[in-house]
Amino acid sequence: MEWFTAPGYALSRLVLLRLLAAVYLVGFLAAARQFRALLGEHGLLPIPRYLRYRGWRDAPSLFQWHYSDRFFAAVSWGGAALSAAICAGLADLVPLWASMLFWALLWVLYLSIVNVGQTWYSFGWESLLLEAGSLAVFLGNAKVAPPFTVLLLFRWLLFRVEFGAGLIKLRGDRCWRDLTCLKYHHETQPMPGPFSWYFHHLPLPLHKVEVAANHVAQLGFPVLLFTPQPVASIAAGAMVLTQLWLVVSGNFAWLNWLTIALAFSALRLPGGTSGSRSAPIWFEVLVLLFTALVVALSWWPARNLLSREQLMNFSFNRLHLVNTYGAFGSINRIRFEVVLEGTEDAVPTADSVWREYGFKGKPGDVRRRPRQYAPYHLRLDWLMWFAGISPSYARPWLRTFADRLLAGDPATLRLLRHNPFPDHPPRWVRAVLYRYRFTTRAERRASGAWWHREPLRTYLAPMGSLDS
């Protein structure tokens, strides 16, 4: 079936799949390095406790058969090794069926982590990575030309990511409609990057240009993905540029890089050919069956796009196939930060000296310039941002976190940048809510600080080591 293949997209497929494998690699590395403190047997939200109340139907995962920290480490490090091998080209060196098995294995391993990850894995880009990974199973390797229907499914995924985000903004905060949201967003976003201070201080007219350009990128270009070439390539290329702008201006884990990878389903690159133009009949049948499944499952996200009560970052099934996406329907005007502190005093008093724990990514020390961590995902830092918005986000795990600091737990301390008690744990730990804002240019010149902060109230009353 000549219509089935699109040999002109062979190089585009190669870039898409290598980037996707690189994102999988980052995801598995983040899981391997952070799970013990967050999800392990003695973590803040232990997986064994979660699985006591969740069966296969609620949380399909390999860990339903067995859980141990050693097994989780094997899954995450094994996924990282396989992702690295695919990124290096392994999937193009093996038969087509083996390539499909490799991608299916990546999907199963990461699905197993996400479905037991609880609030630490409640981000939209987890579902996005899984959905893209399921599509990659059927995109083929260098042995066959790319199936055209799967390229269209990738474009449909990219359309939902961008168009859904655009609609949620127009239906949400008024500042998206009057073009003023970026007056606040660069300062109040979850994890500012090294250039966010400079973006924040752009003149208001340029902020309005940013917002207007965002509306064009998310509501205009996605429609053009389904037009003939070269229009589709121009639209996809423009979307890549807007994603790179977001990479420079903030830290959004792998969301931007994964969106860039998806764009190569429409961005046709010159050169590159497949080893074989024809695909085996069994492969064509599987691709068409999978395409039909995605079309059927698309009913729910398509209906959601048209709904006035549009859901944001929602999965309609536990396999995370064909989801709905979107972010920042509302923008915070003020930045609140929860700061953890400890003291060595036997009994805390008004004169006690409290020393601050430093996080890797979230604002803390006002003189420390924000760092670039994306595409790596600092899960604790992101949840601390949500904790500043509402205590309800932190209620399930914050007191346990404080207990781990009182115990000097090594796995928990490895999640932090700075431990102010290197020799022995503190006697008491508390949390204080601060208001943060970027310094003005004059304040920055005078003090060298990137942030100005003021304490607001006690967020978590002092907890002593005897309380745990």
Image (tube, rainbow, N blue to C red):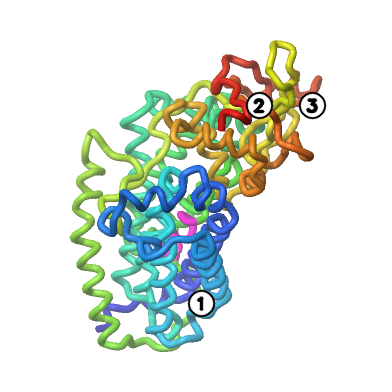
Tell me the crowding category of disc 2: few under 14, some 14 to 19, or many 20 or more residues within 10 angstroms, Cα based: many
Residue beneath label 3, please? 448
In this view, which residue lies farthest toward the top? 350
Which numbered tag is attached to residue 428? 2
From this viewpoint, which residue is outermost toward the front? 466
Foreground mark, 1 or 3, reads 3
| Disc on res. 289 | none
**Disc 3 residue type?**
Gly
Q: Quadrant of the N terminus?
A: bottom left
x and y, in percent, of residue 143 in the image: 42, 86
Mark 1 = which residue? 271
Residue span colored magenta = 258-267
Tell me residue 354's x, y (percent). 72, 23
Residue at 32% across, 78% down? 5
Location of residue 63 (image quadrant): bottom left
Mark found first going from the N terminus, 2 or 1: 1
Q: Where 266 sits versus 259, above or below?
A: below
Tell me: residue 163, above or below residue 468.
below
Crowding at mark 3 (Cα within 10 Å: few <14, some 14-19, many 20+): some
Number of residues whose C-alpha sits closer than 10 Å to that of mark 1, classed few (under 14), some (14–19) or many (20 or more): few
Q: Does residue 4 appear left or right of residue 468 in this picture?
A: left
Residue 241, horizontal then vertical, whole percent: 53, 51
Q: Earlier in the sequence, mark 1 or mark 3?
A: 1
